[in-house]
Amino acid sequence: MTASTIGSTGGPPHDLAQNQHAYLELVRRRRLYGGVLLILFVALMMSGFQMAQSRNAGGFIDGLPMVLAFPTEVISEAWEKRANLPGIFVAHIPSLIETLNIAAVSTILGGIAAMLLALLSTRGLSPWPRLTGVFRRIMDVCRAIPEIVIALILIYILGGGPVPAVIAISLHTAGALGKLFSEVAENADLKPVEGLTSVGAGWGQRMWFGVLPQVAPNWISYGLLRFEINVRASAILGFVGEGGIGHDLKIAMQWGMGRYDLVVGIFLLLFLTIVIIDTISDRVRERLVKG
Amino acid sequence: MTMTELSTPTLARHVLKTHGRRRLMSFAVPLAILAYLVYAAISFDVAGLASRAKMDNARVLLSDFWQHKTHVTRQNRTGALSVSIDGEAKGTYPADRLPAWITQAGGVTTVDLGDGHLVTYDQGGARYVVPDYGTIDIRQTGDGLALQAPQPLPDWINASEGRISVTTEAGRFAYTRSKVETFKYEPGWALFFFTLDSPFHYMSWPEIAASALWGERVDPTRPNIAVMADQFWNNAMWRHGDVIWALFETVLMAFLGTFGAAIVALPLGFMAASNMMPLGALRFGLRRIFDFIRGVDGLIWTIVLARAFGPGPMTGSLAILLTDTGSFGKMFSEAFENIDEKQVEGIRSTGGNALQRARFGVIPQVMPVLLSQVLYFLESNTRGATIIGAIVGGGIGLLLTQAIQTQKDWEDVAYYMVLIVLTVIAMDNLSGWLRRRLIKGGTA
């Protein structure tokens, strides 16, 4: 790296002093730029933080000792009532299953949509190469709209229940996975596809037999990663909108003092589920990618 | 593989067996997924969805997204007429500047809904002329309303004791004892630029441009263009100024949270990397902390922090910071473990200490990878900050949830959605551009 820099910026190779000078000059300039950028960045962070603090209800310094106060209060109360925890676990398993179902269904539906979008937006695989840009924009918009917007609007139309959350998360998943899928598909070997074309296979057959076997491990791996994210998203949507364990948690929080054992119970259930899912999916993904 | 090998019966059997298993899989997996979806559809009660869905709401929402309605209301007792947009006080037309489709003459008000639909308010009643149907005539009698219309009454006319309402494709009309109202629907977001109290509302675009450049000053102390900017920014209907501030707050939350997390996670990542940190116990402890932070999830952290710091953008940025520290710590330590040791050894051979080895041996290698990960997170956090804003009460997320919960300001919802989508796409492009620049600039 350095050798090429010296060779290209300096004059003839024998003029060592001049090269050294030029190199040091380059290093100095680069450090200057780096320093200026760093100062700018620090200033931006500081002023941004100041501004955020001034528009916040409580200040940073005042709130800092309070960070542990709430968890301590909650945990100490829950510890006194720890005998209730197993009962709370059992009582909330149905809503946990609902949350997991929302995540799984939207990963599957969004994943299927993402596969189609990815194939349609990859040049060389798409049946309509001119429209790849259109499908890309569709994915961008699907990714950009926050799930909560879609979910809240759909709750207004469809009433409560898990379906609004499923549709909201699926749309987002389709956009997010579609982008990752199409990056994988771009690197797929086109020879099997050409081979299939030569024997007269249709577009669906070419994709199913020529592309899918190549990209499947990576796609499934991304899909699992997305499932992890969607479990969290589904819990959050429950908290803001309705349905699932997020909603139970919100209700428990609203009960407040006296029912903190409920808060801790639901929280532990969610935490353990997320950790278990992450661990399993980590293992599976490692095996998938390493073959 | 040669032909003789292929032709051996054991191998052929083996190939056929694997092939058969594959074929079975390619049917079994889609079938299993289908079965699961069927189960989910039953447990989510998708069949009952049709009865629960409120299609009226959907219609209201979709029409509100892109059009506005003007209420023309007459109080029957006093005869006072008011014309307002969406029935809001701040969208009320001044009495001397009514829209051209409303005419008043001698106590009779005529509302032209277009396509031959004509509503007339007169003394003691109102008339609605519907093309291809006839005239609906309503008279107020001593004890109720008398309706005269071609029989039989179609289902878009709803007549009861104290209220008669008519819904056509041109608009809606409702008569009660106390007042008569007509709603005219028009495309577009009303008063988006200037409200009715602004003189610029009554000008066309070329007139506004002319007024901005050389027109007579509306306010003698300021040029017209400044007045326009002020009236647009402080538009009472759309509150552009507040909305842009909220949007800025959301981006600020994402920015502070993401980069704050990166700064915190950098040293922690070093300490959690097996090739940098000789102390196994500390490494193990840090990793478990990262796992814990990630496992607890942003939702819980947001709630806990909101209790301590109160609502606002700082709480949101701290929540993002905390959550992402877990992810970055893990990712950074993995990046450190995958570095090329040769460069570190080179620095060590010249007598560099641990800090120098890190600065000159490790950082230049991993910087592009780390930055690109951080920028990916910045992009997704911009979207996440909307949701966090809804929980902690800050930024565009708060405005959005409020607008949705009122269940009538759907044009605001549409406006916010457009802004959010544009912002996220802009951040997407910005981070993509920065990623390309930095990675190229960092390694070249």
Image: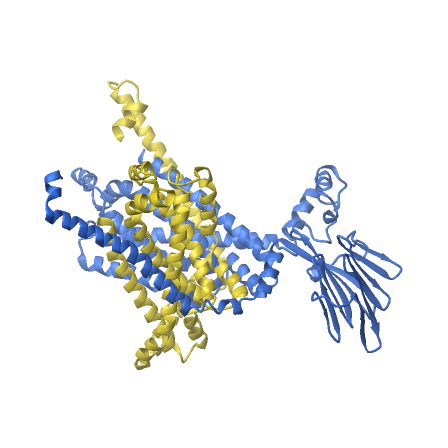
Chain colours: A yellow, B blue
- Quadrant assignment, res B302: bottom left
Residue lying furthest right:
B106
Q: Position of residue A21 (x, y in %)?
A: 30, 25
Camera-side residue: B401 or A217? A217
- Nearest to the observer: residue B90 or residue B231: B90
Seen at 53% across and 55% down, the residue is B246
Q: Quadrant of residue A186?
A: top left
> On the rendered structure, is B337 left or right of A150?
left
Relative vertical location of residue B2 with respect to residue B58 in this rendering, above or below: above
- The structure residue drawn at horizontal position 26% and vertical position 47%, both measured from the top left corner, is B335
Q: Position of residue A195 (x, y in %)?
A: 30, 37
A133 lies left or right of B111: left
| Residue A22 visible, this angle | yes
Q: Picture coordinates of residue B196 (x, y %)? A: 72, 53
Judging depth in this view, the residue of B383 and A107 nearest the camera is: A107
Q: Position of residue A284 (x, y in %)?
A: 25, 56
Total labels: the figure holds: 0
Q: What residue is at 17 percent from the left and 40 percent from the top?
A: B345
Q: Which residue occupies 53% across, 61% down? A: A153
Image quarter where the N terminus of chain A lies is top left
